[in-house]
Amino acid sequence: MKTALTNTMNPFVFMVSSISIFTITLLGVCFPNFSRSFFQTIQSELIKDFSWFYVLADGQKIRFLLL
């Protein structure tokens, strides 16, 4: 029996997402020190390079709420 969820779910996207989550979890379990430093580096680079995008997006939310 098909439900609304199976009608709207894209199997390819679901499988890629599941494999990605499993891989990241396995990396964290097997190599905790490496994964901690790796993801901290990624996070700091994202904050350094894309912080302007967050400010812009947050400013748009405030503008939307004020109008």
Image (cartoon, rainbow, N blue to C red):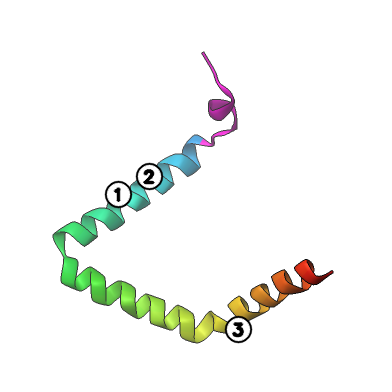
Q: Find residue 37 and report its image quarter.
A: bottom left
Disc on res. 52: 3
Q: Find residue 39 and report its image quarter.
A: bottom left
Disc on res. 30: none
Distance of mark 1 from mark 3, alpha carbons? Answer: 31 Å
- Foreground of the two, 4 or 14: 4
**Residue 42 x/y as whole percent:** 38, 76
Q: Which residue is mark 2?
A: 18
Q: Which residue is mark 1?
A: 22
- 19 left or right, relative to 60: left
Distance of mark 2 from mark 3, alpha carbons? Answer: 31 Å
Please, which residue is most extreme toward the top here? 1
**Residue 58 x/y as whole percent:** 65, 74
Distance of mark 1 from mark 2, alpha carbons? Answer: 6 Å
**Point 48% across, 35% down: residue:** 11
Please, which residue is most extreme toward the right here? 67
Of badges 2 and 3, nearer the viewer stands: 3
First of labels 1, 3 by sequence position: 1
The residue under label 2 is which amino acid type? Ser
